[in-house]
Image: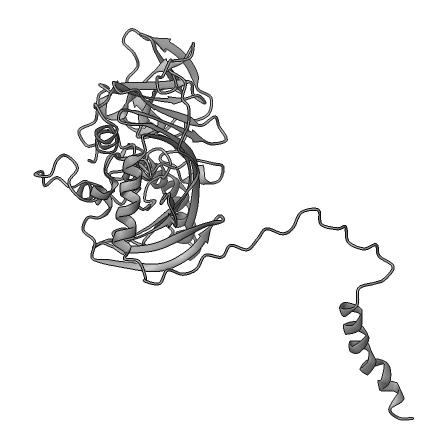
Amino acid sequence: MRTEPWMYWKRALTIALIAGPMLALVSIDVEAGRRGGGGFGGGGGPGVRAPRANIGGGPVHGPNNNFNRRDVNVNRNVNVDVDRHWGYGAVGAGAAVAVGTAVAVGAIVSTLPPSCSAFVANGVTYQNCGGTYYVPRYDGPNVVYEVVPAPPGWNQ
Amino acid sequence: MKILPWLPIALFPTLALLGCASPPTEQPAPPVATAAPAAPVVSPEPAVKPQPMDVLKRMAAYLHTLDHFTVTVEKTTDLILPTDQRLHADQTMEIAIQKPNRLRVNYLNLSGGRQLFYDGKDFSLYTPEQNVYATAPAAPTIDETLDLLADRYRISLPIADLLVADPDSRLAQHITSETYVGRILIRGVVCHHLAFRTSDLDWEIWIEDGPKPLPRRLALTDRSVKGSPQMMANLNDWNLAPTFSAAYFTFTPPPQAEKIQFLDAAPAARPAKAVK
C-alpha cells in the first residue's frame, strides 16, 4: 500500500499527542523537586518573581561583620509570604503533580494530590497518595508537603 | 414655516439641561444632616522643608522609645508570573511587640490564618487549617530572632526593619538618594512622604506629622528583580498602650495539633540533585 503524504502528518500528530503530556509531566516533576533556589514553595510557585520583604541593609550581626542580609536575599532565597487562594493556587509549586506520577523523594508540593489517605506512624501523620508518601513541613511560614520514603515497617 | 420642523430638536438639549439643573420639586427635600461634615484637615506647610533623613531618624528614635505596641499591617505584594502577568497578593497581619523579647504575629486569611509566637526563649508557628505547629529555639531578643527567622527559617516579616530596637540602623544604610516628597493624608493622618534609593531598591515611607511620628505606610520597589515588583504595607490601628495577658506570647499547642518540622531541619532523605 502506497504511503500517502498526510500519513506523515498523522504520525507527527500522534507522537506530539503522546510526547507532549509526558514532557509536561517531566517538567512539573523537575519543578516540584526544585527547592532552595526559587524558594517559592508555599505561595509563589516556580518562576514567580516577588520583591524582597524588607529594606534592611547594614550589618545584621554586629558592626564589624560584613555579612549583609541583602546579599543573601539577592539570591531570592526567601519565601514569598503570600496566601494562596483559588485561581492563584494553580501556579503554586508542584500543585499540578499528576496522580500516579512517580515523584522523587524530597520533592516539595504545596498541595496534596486528590484521594490521599492519612495514617500515623511514629507520631507523624503521613499522607498516602497513590503509593507516594507525604508529610507536612514548614517551608518558611507556609505548610508544604514533602515526599518521603514509606515509614519503616509500613506495608501499603 | 420652514424652521418649525427643527424647533423640537433645537429645544430638546435646552430642556434637558434645564431638567438637570433644576431639581424636581415634587420629590421630598433631602433629610437634614444631623452631623456637620468632617472639618477639612488643614495643616500649614512648614516654613522650612524638612530634611528626609531628619524625619526618618525622628521616627526611628520615637519607635525606639516604644516599649510595647500593637499594629495591623495590610500589605500588597506584586507577584510576576512566568508569563509576566502581574498579580497583587494581599496579606493582613496583626503584630504585637513587648520589648525586648516578646513578639506575636497573627496572620489573617480565609482558611484560619496562622500565628507566630516568640516568648523570649522559643518561637512557634501554628497553622490551624492543618492543625500543625513547629517550635524551635529563638534568640534572646526580638532583633536577633527576626534575623534568625529571616536568615535560617526564611520567615520574613514585611516591616521587620521597623520592629527592631534601633530601626535607624536598618533603614538609613546604603542610601544613594533621599527626597522629601511632601505632606499628604494617609487615612486621615497628615504624613511626611519620604523617598529613598539604594543601589537596587527604591523605597518610600509615610511618617505621621506631629508628636507621634509613627510610620503609616511603607512601599518598596525591588529593582534587583526583573520587572521591579513592589510591596506596599499600610500600618494601621497603632495601639501604643496595649495590655497583654500573661500567656499572650507563649504558644500552647491545642489538643490534637501535630508538631511538624521545618523543611531545612527535616532529616528525610534529600536527593543530592536538589538545586540549592
Whether residue A148 appears in this view of the structure is: no
Q: Is residue B58 left or right of residue B173?
A: right
Identify the residue shown where x is 17% and y is 37%: A60
Q: Nearer the viewer, residue B178 or B113?
A: B178
For the residue pair B185 and B199, the one nearer the viewer reads as B185
Q: Name which quarter of the figure residue B131 lies in.
A: top left
Q: Position of residue A91 (x, y in %)?
A: 40, 40
**In the image, residue B112 lies at what x, y percent?**
47, 26
Quadrant of the snapshot with the N terminus of chain B: bottom right
The residue under the point 21% across, 27% down is B271
- Would residue B245 be found to the left or right of residue B54 on screen? right
Query: Of B272 and A102, which appears nearest the observer?
Result: B272
Res. B33 in view? yes
Question: Is A67 above or below relative to B179?
Answer: above
Image quadrant in which the C terminus of chain B is located: top left
- Is A141 situated above or below A19? above
- Left or right: A98 as drawn, with respect to B35: left
Where is A5 relative to B128, above or below?
below
